[in-house]
Structures are given as C-alpha cells and as structure tokens.
Image (tube, grey):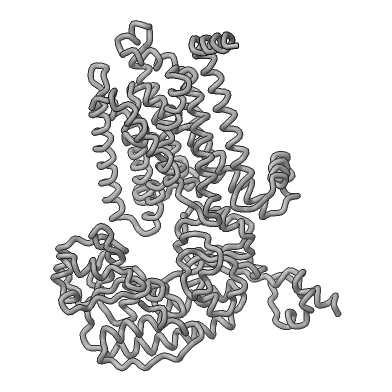
Amino acid sequence: MSLPTATARRAGAGDRSSRGRQAVLVAATLAVAAGLVSVAAGAAGLSLGEVVHILWAGATGQRHTLPVGAATIILDIRLPRVLLALLVGASLALSGAAMQGLFRNPLADPGIVGVSSGAALAAVIVIVLGPTLMPFMPAAISRHLLPLAAFFGGLGTTALLYRLATREGQTSIATMLLVGIALAALGGAITGILIFISDDQQLRELTFWTMGGFGGATWLKLAAALPLIVPAFIAAPFMARGLNALALGEAEAFHLGIEVERLKGLAILVIAAAVGAAVAVSGIIGFVGLVAPHLLRVAIGPDHRTLLPAAAFLGAALLAIADLIARTSVAPAEMPIGILTALIGAPFFLWLLLRRRGALVL
Amino acid sequence: MITQTLFRAVTPARRTLSCAVILAAALAACLPAAADTIVDAEGRRVEVTDRSRIVSIGGAVTEILFALGLADQVIAVDTTSTYPAAAQAKPDVGYMRALSSEGVLSLGPSLILAVKGSGPKDVVDVLATASVPMVMIPDEPTAAGVGAKIRAVAAAAGVPEKGEELAKAVEADLKTVTDAVGKAGAQHSAAFVLSMANGAPLLAGDHTSAAGMFALAGLRNAFAFDGFKPASPEAIVEAAPAIIVTMGRGGHDATDAIRQNPAFATTPAVKDGRILAFDGAYLLNFGPRTAEAARELAMTVYPELAIPPLARHPWTETAAAAKP
C-alpha cells in the first residue's frame, strides 16, 4: 500500500515543472472563480440568475431590454471594477515576483521598496500641477497621461533603486530597504509640498493615491491601464529563463548565455509598466506583490517559468476577493481595501521575517 | 374624467398641485409623478420625477430634508448626518467623501441629493452618469449660502414653497444675529482647531466653514491661510487668538490637548480660559440651525451684546440639547 504513495512522492519531488504547471492551472482556476463570485456578489442583492441574465443580455447587445438600474450596477459598476481588481492584482503580483527575481531578494515588493511611492508621486504631480502646466489639455489625453506619468515614476524609482542597491552583481538587502525608505520619505515630503499648494478638491484626490481602492472603476480607466499592462504581461514570460539563471549569480547567468544587462533592463521596464498602470488606476495597494509570489515559492519552488504566471493568477484572485470583502462587508458603505490587504499581508510579512531570521543578514 | 386626469398627470415638466389633489391615492401610486428639471450646483441639468426614495449625503442636506418634513422619504443618509437623532436610524452609506457607487445604488434610490464636495470624485462621476438622478447641492459657508442650500434641496425634493418658507425664517434669524453682532466694537480674534492629532494642531484658514461661522458671530479668524492646514507653533504664538473654538461632544474634545500645547498655552485664549467646544455638525453644517449656532457662539464671546432670542422652530427644538 505504501509503495505507490512513495513512488508518487518521488515523482512529484523530482519533477517540479509538472507541479508548477498544476499550480498555474490551480491559480488560474482560482482567479476565474474569484472573478465570477465577485461579479455575482455585491451590495445590490441581485440573484445569480439575474446577474447571469444581465451579463448575457449585455454581451449579446440586448441591454435595452434590461431594467436600467440593475444593468447599470452590473455592467457599468461591478463588471469593470472586478476586471480592474483582477488586472491590478495580477500586475502587482507579477511585478513582485519579477522584482524578487531581479534583486535575488525575498523582500522586494513594489510597495515596500518605494516603487509604488514613486509611481504615486508622479501621478500626484500630474493631478496638482497638470492643470497649471497644461491648461488646455483635453480630458481624453490627461486620462492617459496619468498612467504614463505613474509608469515613468515607477521606472525612475526602480532604476534608481537598482543602481544604488546593487554593486558588482550583489544586491544588499540593507541598502535596498534603506533606499526604499529614503525614496518613500522623499515622496512623502514632495507630496507634503503639493498638499500645501493644492485646493480642497485636489487634496481629496491626493488622499486617494495613498489609500488605494477600486471605487471609481470605469471602462475608461480599464482602457487607460491596458496599454501599459498588456505589454508587461506579454514580455514577462521572456524573462523567466533569464531570472532563473540570475538566481545563480550575475556572472553565472552570463556564462549560461544570458544577456544580463538586457534582462535587467527588460525586468525594470516590466515592473515599472505593471506597477505604474496599477497605481494610476487604483492608488497604492500593498502586500499583494509580496504574498502571492511567496505562497507559490513555498508550494512549487522558485522556477520563474511557472512562478510568474501562477503569481499573476494568484494575485488577481487575492485582490478580487479582498475587494469583494471591502465592498460587501459594511454595505452600503465601503471599507478601504488597503486595510484588508495590510490585515492579511502584514502578519504574513512578519511570519516571513521570522521564518527567515537565520538567513537574513542586514 | 379619469382619462383627462391621467393625461394631465403624465404631461412632462408639469407640476400642478390640483393634479395630485384630484388623483385618487391608488392611482397616484402607479403613475409617474410630475417631472422637474433642476440645474444643480455643478451646472448639470437633472430631470427629477420620483422623490419617494431619497438618499441624502451631507449633514446639512439631511437636516434640511427633515426640517421640510420629508423624513419618511429619506431612505439612507451618510455618516455626517448626525442631526436630528432620527436620521441616525437610517441606513448609512458611509462617509460623504468615501462613498461607494454600488452601495448607494443598491438601496434602490429614486433621487440622490449630495452636498458639493462629496466624493471620491470618480464615484460621484459614476453616480452622475447612472440612471438615478443625482442633484449636487451648493455649499457656501455664508448667510446667503444657507438660504441657497435650503432652496436647492427644497427644489430638488419638489417642495419649493416650503423651502422658501424655511429659507426666509432662517435668513430672518441670521439677520437678527448679524445685526446685533454688527454693533460689537472691536472684533475678537479667534482660532478654530479642527484636530490635535499627535499634538499637531490642524487649524482653519480662509474659505472654510469655520471661518464662515466666525464671520457670522463677529469674530476675526486669526489665521489667513487657505483651507484647513497644520500651523507652526510660532505662528500660533504670534497670532495670539483671544478665543479658541474646537469641536466635540460630551467631553470628547481637544480642549485638554489645546491647553497643554506649549504654543497655545501662550495665547490669551488659554490664559483666560476661553476655549469653546461645540458640536461639529451644529456649528459647521450651514443648515437650518446655523442662526442658532451663530447666536450661541456670539453670546458666549460677546456677553455684553443683548442678541434677542430667536423664535423656537421645530427644526431647532433639540439644538440646545445637542450642544456639549
């Protein structure tokens, strides 16, 4: 009786890639399920049958046959919101996984090391100074300017972080965290200056960037984020093999035939695009980029070929569920989603630190 | 005759009282009510037909709706709607600046009244384009602003005559107070402390509701910056306000923190023990109770002025009880 079990275990341990493929499938299933549950549930008490009917009618161009109120809630409010939560969750988890690979460091997370702050700062500058610097900008252009600014903010921060924290192919954890703290402080200071010169309305918009959330999700926002997120998703698989080699060390990766500089450049671009777009549409949402990749590393190991897609799917599922709780638990009011991700993420982060206490040298 | 009544009732953009009178109650329930086109505070034209299920966002908006006797039509309020007490029994759609679009719409409202400044902006934009009419109510912290706010709420709620009556009564009271206050000699300088979080005072500057209330009560705001801002200790010492006003209820206020703050300790206000705590909604909502609040503040600050007591109104009945 024990023989087949032992064989199976040996096979599982020896063939991590099949386990990895399974994990990708499981994570993808989770993401789809989380998306469906999120669309089906909400503050408005519509039954599953009604929701399916509305979605079907909406998809087949029969929207005019629906009651206006219910159609608005599902098709204009809930559906774009769920899609945005899935997309942002995937972006944050993917960039978290890519960052941890690039820095060869388990603590790298766009929120912790200041990439999100950099992206948010650029967005805040556009909000406050945009009307002054470019008074006649049409709304359609400024909508796309915001994600673009956040992208360049994220790009600048990631590149600076890498330049400062990495020396001769070795990333110092201490330097990276300290640079992250310094960048976050700088961002806070500049935001402080902007708060002083902004009016009340702008001030409220600024608060949004530090809180994060999907309350204002619309199809337009989704469309504004896609031009940055889609290329990042497409590029991500091409750096998986490189990141695997990089885990051995920069010189070793070079000898394995990896163009290290090009790989690093690509990774920084992917991270900046994914984080920038996510921050531009939903503000700063922490811990997703940390929790999803690490859960998977524990389960399937560090192979980026499966880790990157699985992390993206898992991140999407986690953020969709977090947003579902945020908008239903205190309905008709809403809880800030940052509270929920921090509530789950912070203890996880502490657990991670405790578990790796022996291995971390600061 | 019924046919004719039906015809008149469904004629768009017509609001005739006789119609409602003639209609049998049963018929009225299943017919579309008369439609009004309201131009709101954002300059949008909003078509309002059904006022049976109102979501009220903003403490003053709720106060006005209750003062107009429309309490039964209000199905939900926001967190800032603390007065009258009956409003707090209604479902809560959250803080007026952190609304949820699906949350508000899930209650099945037929009309959303929101004070200007409600948010977040993205959510308000979504609500404005949804099928339910949303009317933004102007919010200017002045005597004229109170009248405008009452008239805007009443027009959207379909009771402009009642609104005119309420607005005139409140404006008359406000005039009584400002006339009396105008006879004061030198104006005292005053500071409004919004919060003392972490010992860092957040103070009211120009263009704030607090500055508006100071103007009504004959006080000069000691701080001239724009909006609510943290002030440096040195600026507080230099401004030397004679009066400090803060908000709080039932002893939960910042007066102790202000007294113990080294910068405030140097001001005449603290030395003379002139720190006043008022209920925030009562003092700063700029609604039907504003004349009462302005009178109370002015009487406390200038006891030598004999401001005639204001007539008792149903909407201020518990105002005295609401103060700390």
> Which residue is pictured at 53% across the width and 66% down the height?
B77
Residue A37 visible, this orientation:
yes
State which quarter of the image contains the C terminus of chain A.
top left
Q: Is residue A228 above or below residue A79?
A: above
Give the x, y percent position of residue A59: 70, 39
Give the x, y percent position of residue B175: 39, 87
Q: Say which of B196 and B289 sits in front.
A: B196
Q: Is residue B235 above or below residue B274?
A: above
Give the x, y percent position of residue A338: 42, 45
> Which residue is pictured at 42% across the width and 27% down the height?
A294
State which quarter of the image contains the N terminus of chain A.
top right
Q: Say which of B225 and A163 sits in front.
A: A163
Residue A149 visible, this orientation:
no
Residue A30 relative to residue A188: left or right: right
Give the x, y percent position of residue B204: 29, 67
Snapshot quadrant of residue A199 = bottom left
Q: Say which of A271 and B145 sits in front.
A: A271
The total of numbered circles placed on residues is 0
Q: Say which of A133 and B118 sits in front.
A: B118
Residue A185 relative to residue A290: left or right: left
Residue A25 relative to residue B8: left or right: left
Q: Is residue B82 above or below residue A196?
A: below
Q: Is residue A234 above or below residue A131?
A: above
> Which residue is pictured at 26% across the width and 70% down the height?
B255
